[in-house]
């Protein structure tokens, strides 16, 4: 179904009530047990699961190019095996971006899984349209300029033969359409993270992309941003880490969102972590630029007007959320092959651990010269001394009990990067006494990112419903 043909005003009407949404994942590799717990006793209308980061799409696209059956989040089938029966039993609808670079293959796999589990009649929706890799040449030929938002460069043609992915951050309109078609599970690709929450909210309340709904859509964006990283709102990544109880059994956040554009963030009673004004504020300010202009595909949120107040144990209310209608352009992240990384790790004991590490660095530099290493970047870290703060780190005025030495080198081809591994291995004999090693690292490919903007008109989302 092409969304351009969908009559939104016939589909929706303004409604009241409350929608209850759980955050079931914050990244590819997140814990599954808190999501299971949400479905078991969270009384949820929806559970939304975010799996993607910017670099993830290039990695998944490479998998898809090697095997057309792959390219979605590898964890998705095992997660859905645990979650589908619970969602069916509780009446909770699942929304995720685990389709990655291949949402159709992901949805077909989940349909197979639903049939295997005896969940006949379950409706799995595929959301597609974010992948613009095949359209890049036509867009370039039509005069589109894809200026790099980080560097200001505009010569995309210079890396065209190395591009492996081009995905637009799409809005929640396709998620809304899928839910309107009765989807029990929605599997999308690179929708924006908070669209996973905006979609169910807009669907439930019948909101439209009109100026009159701008503040309420901005409220949904704000809430989606607050909870999209799951445990990051319930005590994870907190600067008050020492105050957060039982983080090994942390509870993922739940949103109680009202039709008036206010919401309460909470978690299940008895789970670890904490929800208070500080944990909410910490994530509200996470990964943002201008707090007055948080630009998302569904709208623009103004974080400076939000009122945040504790209304009970592990209950924080957000109100007075405002914003503006959605922007005309969407973020487009282009991933390209950007050479190779060669790296190694060595460790040195007391006494004279730091001196041993520095001697090893000197020896490696000589070996690189002897091996004729051609590198455009080279970096050394003294682990335990300057790894995190670099030149700003003070030199220790004592003899550390142990020091690690990490070397990372960027090269244009794999053979050059492999020289780093060989040189590090050679320090078994050439290195200072007491030298020990981490697992030798094979050369690995590097993917660069070219963040840019594309006209909303260039992106056409579609949905398809697969029935188990």
Image: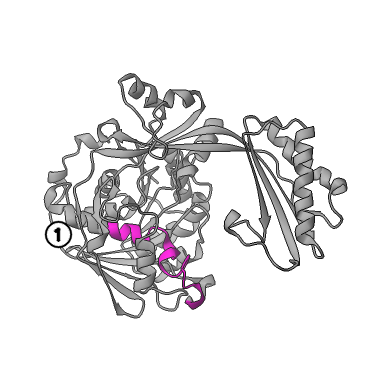
Image height of 189 relative to 369, above or below: below
On the rendered image, what quadrant is the N terminus found in? top left
Q: Which residue is mark 1?
A: 15
Residue 234 quadrant: bottom left
How many C-alpha atoms fall within 10 Å of the one at disc 1: few (<14), some, or many (≥20)?
few
In the displayed structure image, the side of residue 400 where residue 46 appears, left or right: left
Q: Nearer the viewer, residue 412 or 231?
A: 412
Q: Looking at the image, what colour scheme do you see? A: one colour
Q: Nearer the viewer, residue 400 or 94?
A: 400
Q: Nearer the viewer, residue 360 or 37?
A: 360
Q: Where residue 296 appears, x then y in whole percent?
A: 29, 48
Residue furthest to the top in view is 141
In the displayed structure image, the side of residue 286 where residue 438 appears, left or right: right
In the displayed structure image, the side of residue 78 where residue 296 appears, left or right: left
Which residue is at 32% across, 75% downward?
A: 315
Query: Over which residues does the magenta segment extend?
Result: 222-243
Q: Nearer the viewer, residue 178 or 387?
A: 387
Which residue is at 47% across, 54% downward?
A: 27
Question: Residue 184: in sight, yes or no?
Answer: no
Image height of 401 relative to 208, above or below: below
Q: Where residue 456 appears, x then y in whole percent?
A: 26, 35
Residue 229 is covered by the magenta coloring:
yes
Residue 29 is covered by the magenta coloring:
no
Q: Where residue 389 appears, x then y in whole percent?
A: 57, 57
Image height of 452 relative to 293, above or below: above
Residue 3 quadrant: top left
Q: Is label 1 in a helix, a strand or a loop? A: loop
Image label count: 1
Residue furthest to the bottom in view is 313
């Amino acid at each position: 179904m092409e969304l351009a043909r969908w009559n939104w005003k016939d589909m929706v009407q303004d409604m009241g009530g409350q929608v209850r949404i759980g955050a079931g994942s914050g990244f590819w590799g997140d814990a599954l047990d808190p999501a299971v717990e949400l479905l078991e006793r969270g009384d949820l209308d929806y559970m939304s699961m975010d799996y993607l980061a910017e670099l993830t799409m290039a990695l998944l696209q490479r998998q898809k190019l090697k095997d057309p059956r792959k390219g979605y989040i590898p964890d998705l089938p095992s997660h859905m095996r645990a979650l589908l029966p619970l969602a069916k039993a509780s009446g909770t609808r699942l929304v995720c971006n685990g389709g990655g670079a291949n949402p159709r293959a992901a949805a077909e796999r989940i349909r197979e899984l639903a049939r295997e589990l005896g969940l006949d009649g379950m409706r799995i929706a595929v959301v597609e349209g974010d992948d613009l890799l095949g359209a890049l040449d036509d867009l370039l030929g039509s005069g589109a300029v894809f200026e790099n938002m980080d560097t200001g460069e505009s010569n995309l043609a210079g890396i065209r033969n190395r591009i492996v992915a081009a995905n637009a951050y799409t809005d929640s309109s396709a998620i809304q359409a899928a839910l309107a078609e009765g989807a029990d599970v929605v599997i999308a690709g690179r929708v924006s993270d908070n669209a996973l929450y905006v979609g169910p909210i807009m669907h439930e309340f019948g909101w439209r992309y009109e100026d009159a709904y701008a503040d309420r859509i901005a409220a949904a964006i704000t809430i989606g941003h607050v909870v999209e990283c799951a445990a990051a709102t319930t005590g994870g990544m907190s600067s008050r880490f020492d105050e957060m109880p039982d983080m090994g059994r942390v509870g993922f956040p739940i949103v109680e969102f009202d039709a008036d554009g206010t919401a309460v963030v909470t978690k299940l009673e008895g789970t670890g972590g904490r929800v208070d004004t500080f944990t909410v504020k910490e994530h509200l300010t996470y990964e943002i630029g201008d707090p007055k202009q948080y630009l998302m595909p569904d709208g623009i949120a103004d974080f400076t007007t939000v009122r945040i107040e504790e209304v009970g144990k592990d209950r924080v209310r957000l109100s007075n959320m405002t914003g503006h209608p959605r922007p005309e352009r969407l973020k487009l992240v282009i991933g390209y092959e950007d050479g190779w990384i060669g790296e190694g790790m060595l460790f040195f004991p007391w006494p004279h651990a730091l001196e041993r590490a520095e001697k090893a660095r000197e020896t490696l530099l000589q070996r690189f010269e002897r091996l004729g290493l051609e590198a455009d970047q080279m970096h050394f870290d003294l682990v335990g001394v300057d790894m995190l703060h670099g030149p700003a780190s003070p030199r220790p005025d004592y003899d550390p009990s142990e020091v690690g030495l990490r070397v990372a080198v960027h090269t244009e081809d794999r053979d050059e990067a492999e020289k780093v591994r060989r040189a590090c291995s050679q320090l078994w004999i050439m290195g200072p006494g007491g030298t020990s090693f981490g697992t030798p690292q094979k050369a690995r490919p590097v993917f660069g990112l070219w963040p840019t903007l594309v006209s909303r008109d260039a992106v056409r989302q579609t949905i398809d419903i697969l029935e188990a």
